Image (cartoon, rainbow, N blue to C red):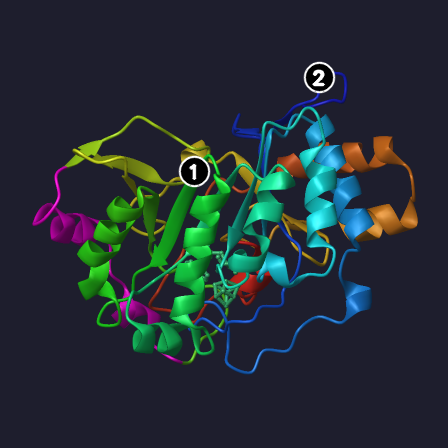
Amino acid sequence: MNDLSSPQLIDRFGRKVDYLRISITDRCDFRCVYCMAEDMTFLPRAQILTLEEIYTLAEAFAQLGVKKIRITGGEPLVRHGVLDLLRDIGAISSLKELVLTTNGSKLTEMAAALKQAKVKRLNISLDTLDAVKFRAITRTGDLSQVLAGIDAAKEAGFERLKINAVILKNRNHHEVCELVQFAVDKEIDISFIEEMPLGVVSAHNRAEAYYPSHLIKADLAQRFALLSSISKTGGPSDYFNVIGTNTRVGFISPHSSNFCSSCNRVRLTVEGRLLLCLGNEHSVDLKQVIRANPGDMAYLKQVIVNAMQHKPEKHEFNLHEQPVILRYMNATGG
Ligand code: SAM
Ligand code: SF4
């Protein structure tokens, strides 16, 4: 059993948790078909954590040995005050990495400020290089804005940039080589993600749209030489170097290559629920804890330590059944 004299978060299976993903808003300017329903209702303000509460929770996790925090959403850059929050979290001295996932729509205005706020790396979502398909997948997005955002992020000089692409059969699977070539030309990394069944979506059938990582690898092998890499970023990607380039290609394969045995992360939803696993509903209500016990850091940390005992061994996703997990990805914090 864990205690507070050794500030570490260890679960029942001996896995050390040192990575926290925080969803700072469920709102977004896009409505990606795999992430949200078209007519989403968003949470009322009283139900979501304030920026001060998010900071307090980040600090508690850092005191418990968390070294990496990813800020995500929804679209994190649409939340008012995000830069102040990032500056505050970026100043926590024990934290090694503050990173952010974004859809890229606001990067032309915000990339330089994010760099100044000590954000080390950015993941930028980009599923297609075709403007019409981009609009169809995101329902509201403008490809040229995101491409300009990627250039602005390059200009700002982040340590590393990575594209995240969710690949759906017959929607964008034909484009995997073009996406890698784009990453090579920009000298950035790219990860391909298998779609996960979170929330009910109507635009496609998830089982039919499943395009596993091994097929993407086979498609890429026609054009690129990939060499398995030992590099890890503390996330679920398996990396390969594209030989002769500065680009790494990652595969996040929740279905075809379960990564649970090395899971080192937990998620905080914008409602203040600590999710112990992406694919299970086990959670602890930390918003209730901080609102009922204001200023009591010791108690908050003890609750977090105890919560690790509820981290499930693994996720079980089944694309052929109605989703068991009703929360959407935007409420989960991808
Ligand atoms: N709005 C930001 C963005 O799109 O990058 C951050 C939040 S988004 C939920 C984080 C990541 O989750 C994105 O790369 C997105 O493509 C991915 N994602 C969303 N829904 C998903 C799903 N059902 N399965 C797999 N990945 C998903
Ligand atoms: Fe918004 Fe990101 Fe979800 Fe797309 S994946 S709807 S950009 S939160």
Answer few, some or many: residues within 10 Å of disc 1's Cα (few below 14, many 20 plus, some between 14 and 19).
some
In front here: 127 or 294?
A: 127
Residue 273 placement (x, y as % from top left): 69, 53
In front here: 238 or 119?
A: 119
Q: CA distance from mark 1 to mark 2?
A: 32 Å
Residue 2 placement (x, y as % from top left): 69, 23
Q: Image quarter for residue 6?
A: top right
In front here: 85 or 317?
A: 85
The N terminus lies in quadrant: top right
Q: Which residue corresponds to mark 2? A: 6
Between marks 1 and 2 in the image, the one whose residue lies nearer the viewer: 1
Seen as rendered, the residue at the extreme left is 222
Q: Is residue 67 shown in magenta?
A: no
Q: Image quarter for residue 44?
A: bottom right
Answer few, some or many: residues within 10 Å of disc 2's Cα (few below 14, many 20 plus, some between 14 and 19).
few
Work out whether 8 lies above or below 178. Answer: above
Q: Is residue 302 left or right of residue 229?
A: right
Magenta region? 203-225
- Mark found first going from the N terminus, 1 or 2: 2
Q: Image quarter for residue 307?
A: top right
Q: Which residue corresponds to mark 1? A: 160
- Please state which amino acid type lies under the numbered disc 1: Arg
Disc 2 on helix, strand or loop?
Answer: loop
Q: Under 8 Å from ligand 1: the CB of mark 1?
A: no
Residue 12 placement (x, y as % from top left): 57, 30
Is disc 1 in contact with disc 2, using a CB cutoff of under 8 Å? Answer: no
